[in-house]
């Protein structure tokens, strides 16, 4: 039904729910944005419009493709509200070595918090209540940057392929670290030896370029971009006087590596004051929030 590029995340399925007076399971299926026209054509072929279907959409594409969506059903769309409501489903992630361990987060009193929405670029929202939020800043360095560079430089054809490459090796072959400059930790400035001081700086040296692998470079690309928006998020959290930073976006859907980097970096550089939070069903958060906006289901 959902084509050759569709991915059904069976492990995320929510079973035995009641929606609109009907009991069933909630499925999670994703496909590349460039195949959106195929989805719309499927809706036409299956006569969605005769079923009084309501399409719940979020993100920039919900506005860009609104006219096409309305050919197959009624459209309910809202981008920023879907990012800031129903955040009580959040769970935090902490890391023990290389293995992630999920830990529930107490959000009885969740506000204020920072929402870092990672898409092609990154938008950062300060949320002070369910209905009171503002966009404080953003950066053009996001998932799109990582995928674009990996495609251009390393020949990757999908985000999953780029992420698989990045998970195999390490960034220290391409990046210059603190211990390369200071010979170890720099205690006076609080810089551990593993701190990246210059991304891709080692690629200036011919012998380094000849020995580095595509996997090393993909890892360095991911670390560079993750560190970039992680640093911006940390400064925004300080400015907004909140210690909770919620990272959302499809880039984290199968990306425990970035979650590890973000969770550790925020905790380390804030001396334990900042906590990075992540979502259980990342990648589908906006869509589910849009759906819940039409129901009393919670």
Image (tube, rainbow, N blue to C red):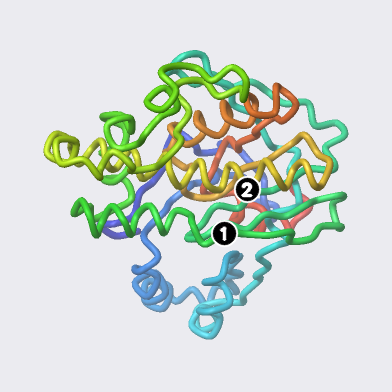
Q: Is residue 254 left or right of residue 119?
A: left
Instruction: Please say whether residue 294 is visible from this viewpoint.
Output: no
Please provide percent x and percent y for residue 182: 44, 23
Nearest the viewer among 69 and 60 is 60
Please provide percent x and percent y for residue 154: 20, 51
Mark 2: secondary structure: helix
Label 1 – label 2 distance at C-alpha: 8 Å
Residue drawn at (33%, 59%), measured in percent from left and top?
A: 148
Q: What residue would you read off at disc 1?
A: 139
Which quadrant does the N terminus fall into?
A: bottom left
Q: Residue furthest top?
A: 96
Nearest the viewer among 196 and 245 is 196
Residue drawn at (33%, 42%), measured in percent from left and top?
A: 201
Q: Quadrant of residue 173?
A: top left
Nearest the viewer among 230 and 119 is 230
Q: Is residue 100 left or right of residue 76?
A: left
Please provide percent x and percent y for residue 262: 55, 34
Q: Is residue 1 above or below residue 204?
A: below
Mark 1: secondary structure: strand
Nearest the viewer among 62 and 11 is 62
Residue drawn at (79%, 60%), measured in percent from left and top?
A: 134
Q: Is residue 259 above or below residue 83?
A: above
Q: Is residue 124 left or right of residue 191?
A: right
Q: What residue would you read off at disc 2?
A: 232
Residue drawn at (77%, 34%), measured in percent from left and top?
A: 243
- Circle 2 Cα neighbour tier, 10 Å, few/some/many (<14 / 14–19 / ≥20): some
**Mark 1 and mark 2 residues within 8 Å of each other at the beta carbon:** yes
Q: Quadrant of residue 220?
A: top left
- Circle 1 Cα neighbour tier, 10 Å, few/some/many (<14 / 14–19 / ≥20): some
Instruction: Please say whether residue 146 is visible from this viewpoint.
Output: yes
């Amino acid at each position: 039904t959902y084509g050759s590029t569709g991915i059904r995340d069976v492990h995320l399925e929510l079973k035995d729910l009641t929606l609109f007076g009907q009991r069933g399971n909630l499925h999670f299926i994703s496909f590349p944005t460039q195949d959106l026209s195929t989805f719309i054509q499927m809706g036409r072929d299956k006569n969605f419009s005769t079923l009084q279907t309501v399409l719940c959409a979020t993100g920039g594409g919900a506005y860009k493709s609104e006219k096409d969506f309305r050919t197959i059903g009624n459209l309910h769309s809202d981008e920023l509200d879907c990012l800031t409501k129903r955040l009580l489903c959040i769970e935090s992630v902490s890391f023990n070595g290389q293995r992630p361990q999920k830990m529930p987060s107490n959000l009885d009193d969740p506000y204020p918090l920072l929402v870092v929405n990672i898409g092609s670029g990154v938008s950062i929202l300060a949320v002070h209540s369910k209905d009171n939020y503002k966009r404080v800043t953003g950066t053009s360095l996001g998932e799109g940057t990582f995928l674009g560079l990996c495609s251009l430089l390393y020949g990757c054809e999908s985000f999953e392929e780029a992420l698989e490459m990045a998970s195999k090796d390490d960034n220290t072959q391409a990046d210059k670290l603190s211990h390369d400059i200071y010979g170890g930790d720099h205690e006076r400035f609080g810089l551990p030896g593993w701190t990246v001081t210059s991304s891709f700086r080692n690629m200036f040296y011919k012998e380094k370029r000849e020995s580095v692998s595509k996997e090393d470079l993909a890892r360095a690309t991911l670390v560079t971009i993750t560190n970039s928006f992680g640093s911006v998020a940390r400064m925004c959290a300080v400015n907004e006087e909140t210690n909770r930073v919620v990272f959302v976006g499809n880039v984290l859907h199968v990306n425990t590596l970035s979650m590890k980097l973000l969770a550790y970096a925020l905790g380390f550089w804030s001396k334990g004051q900042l906590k990075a939070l992540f979502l259980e069903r990342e990648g589908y958060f906006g869509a589910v929030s849009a759906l819940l906006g039409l129901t009393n289901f919670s």
